[in-house]
Amino acid sequence: MQMTSKLRIGLIGAGYWGPNLARNFVEMNDSELVAVADLDQAKLDKMKSRFPKIITTRIYQDLFDLNLDGVVIATPPITHYKFASECIENGLHVMVEKPLVLNSPQGEKLVQLAAQKQRILMVGHTFEYNPAVRYIKEVIDSGELGEVYYIDAVRANLGLFQPNVNAMWDLAPHDISIVLYLLGQEPLSVSSEGGMYVTKKIKQHDVVYMHMRFPEGVLATIRLSWLDPAKTRRITVVGSKKMLIYDDVATTEKVKIYDKGVETPDYVEKYEDFQCSYRYGDITAPHISGEEPLRMECQHFLDCIKYGWQPQSDGESGVRVVRVLEAAEKSLHGSGGQVQVAVPEYARPRAVGAGD
Ligand SMILES: NC(=O)c1ccc[n+]([C@@H]2O[C@H](COP(=O)([O-])OP(=O)(O)OC[C@H]3O[C@@H](n4cnc5c(N)ncnc54)[C@H](O)[C@@H]3O)[C@@H](O)[C@H]2O)c1
């Protein structure tokens, strides 16, 4: 029997999210969690007691001397660019937690560096690996919902407050990545408005409303809040034929497809001609696989290293999300008006058949 060696993985960041990543790399058959770095010795001690075989260190550069294949970065976003570039410079494949970086020039540099060094650069857009989101993408692409009119997303809870970023940079990467993945498009412009309530003293927004405009008039709205009594993770997709609600907090029937719609007359000359007829059909709740999205994401990182695949959530998709956040941030600190999403020429989708 042929023995295949396990990929040697290191982790930087053992705070709230790091242990979830650690558990997955320990449990998967084709990886070995070799080392964990964190500034906080107490967090390292906790990791060591849970995973006794790992090496722990307070100096992340120690990871460069351990013959690792890849590193996963789960530290505050402000550190992502520095840590990811150093890992790539040291010949390591990298998976960086969301958001990839805090500005698009840094993201573009990181993408270039990874390409130049031929290393995998992946961003932790976990929901792109979520079976429910993948199912919704299939439903949209099959045309079952008809033409997508708009998407409405809510990500709200009480906390967890983050000191270095506002609620938008913390929470919106998930919904922006979901919307871009579902529509297969980037928004033309974004607007956002928000409030600083509990976070007033540190001048960070804890509540933000974002609106994205896509080609063909498609709209996407995202409400983000660290100040809400109920944990809500809900996405509504309204199409010309059917509508869909994805409730990530529900324990069963997370996705429901509503055969509901409105028919309007073909010809409307005056207001009185506009008589709508409403259709109330069946509600279906398809079976959705219960696989852990984070496990699928971590497995994908290993597969990309092993087979040289381009990650589903590659560096470029990380930068696409950052560009939307940058435009939204401009709007948030301005008058709340629409701000164009700056997409450099090289990153614009090319017309089919445009040739090389
Ligand atoms: N994909 C998801 O669903 C998901 C969920 C939660 C958090 N995240 C992301 O994970 C990242 C970490 O978030 P968190 O909530 O775990 O934050 P956290 O503050 O709980 O943990 C961050 C850890 O990084 C350590 N750290 C900071 N600077 C360091 C340095 N120079 N060297 C070594 N360690 C250092 C801190 O000591 C801390 O233990 C963020 O990018 C966040 O957006 C992703």
Image: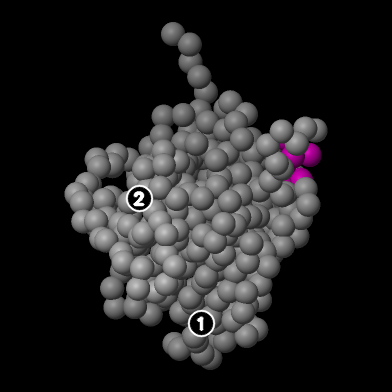
Furthest-top residue in this view: 1
Say above or below: 309 vs 315: above
| Residue under label 1 | 194
Q: In the rendered image, which quarter contains the N terminus?
A: top left
Name the main secondary structure of what is drawn in magenta: helix
**Image quadrant assignment for residue 25:** top left
Mark 2 sits near ligand 1, with its Cβ under 8 Å away: no
Say above or below: 87 vs 235: above
User: Image point 57% across, 27% down: which residue?
Assistant: 306
Q: Nearer the viewer, residue 280 or 309?
A: 280
Q: Which residues are magenta?
A: 111-118
User: Image point 58% across, 51% down: which residue?
Assistant: 185
Front of the two marks 2 and 1:
2
Sooner in the amino-acid sequence: mark 2 or mark 1: 1
| Residue under label 2 | 241
User: Image point 25% across, 42% down: which residue?
Assistant: 286
Determine if the magenta segment contains residue 179: no
Q: Amino acid at mark 2?
A: Lys
**Image quadrant assignment for residue 26:** top left
Q: Position of residue 331 (x, y in %)?
A: 62, 77
Residues at marks 2 and 1, CA–CA distance in whole angstroms: 33 Å
Q: Position of residue 330 (x, y in %)?
A: 66, 76
- How many residues crowd mark 2 within 10 Å: few (<14), some (14–19), many (20+)? some
Residue 354 seen in the figure: yes
Is 22 positioned to the left or the right of 324 in the image?
left
Q: Position of residue 283 (x, y in %)?
A: 21, 50
Q: How many marks?
A: 2
